[in-house]
Amino acid sequence: MNIRADEVFETLSLEGVYVESVFLEKCDDGYYLIYFVKAKSLDNMREFSKKLYTTNRAVS
């Protein structure tokens, strides 16, 4: 991620994302992935992410 930081920040900006954090929480009954996002619009962010994922899969 650090190597391509410019691309990461550009993508977050295009998605309208202010904050994106991921945590791995270990509990007695297993591990939990906690994902936090703050964005202008979660609906717009999801739509942009779907388009980006589809485009990148087609190119790969």
Image (tube, rainbow, N blue to C red):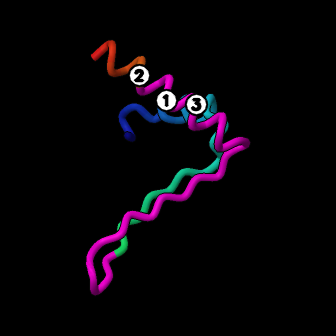
- On the image, which quarter does residue 36 sit in? bottom right
In the picture, which quadrant includes the C terminus? top left
Dot 3: what SS? helix
* CB-based contact (under 8 Å), mark 2 and mark 1: yes
Please determine whether, in this image, residue 20 is positioned above or below residue 60.
Answer: below
Part of the protein shown in magenta:
26-53
Circle 1 residues within 10 Å: few <14, some 14–19, many ≥20: few
Q: Disc 3 residue type?
A: Glu
- Residue under the image location 73 percent in, 42 percent down: 40
Q: Real-space Cα distance between discs 2 and 1?
A: 6 Å
- Residue under the image location 32 percent in, 13 percent down: 59
Q: Real-space Cα distance between discs 2 and 3?
A: 11 Å
Q: Which residue is mark 1?
A: 50
Q: Disc 1 residue type?
A: Lys
Q: Earlier in the sequence, mark 2 or mark 3?
A: 3
Q: Which residue is mark 3?
A: 47
- On the image, which quarter does residue 33 sit in? bottom left
Query: Which label was assigned to residue 54?
Result: 2
In the picture, which quadrant includes the N terminus? top left
* CB-based contact (under 8 Å), mark 3 and mark 1: yes
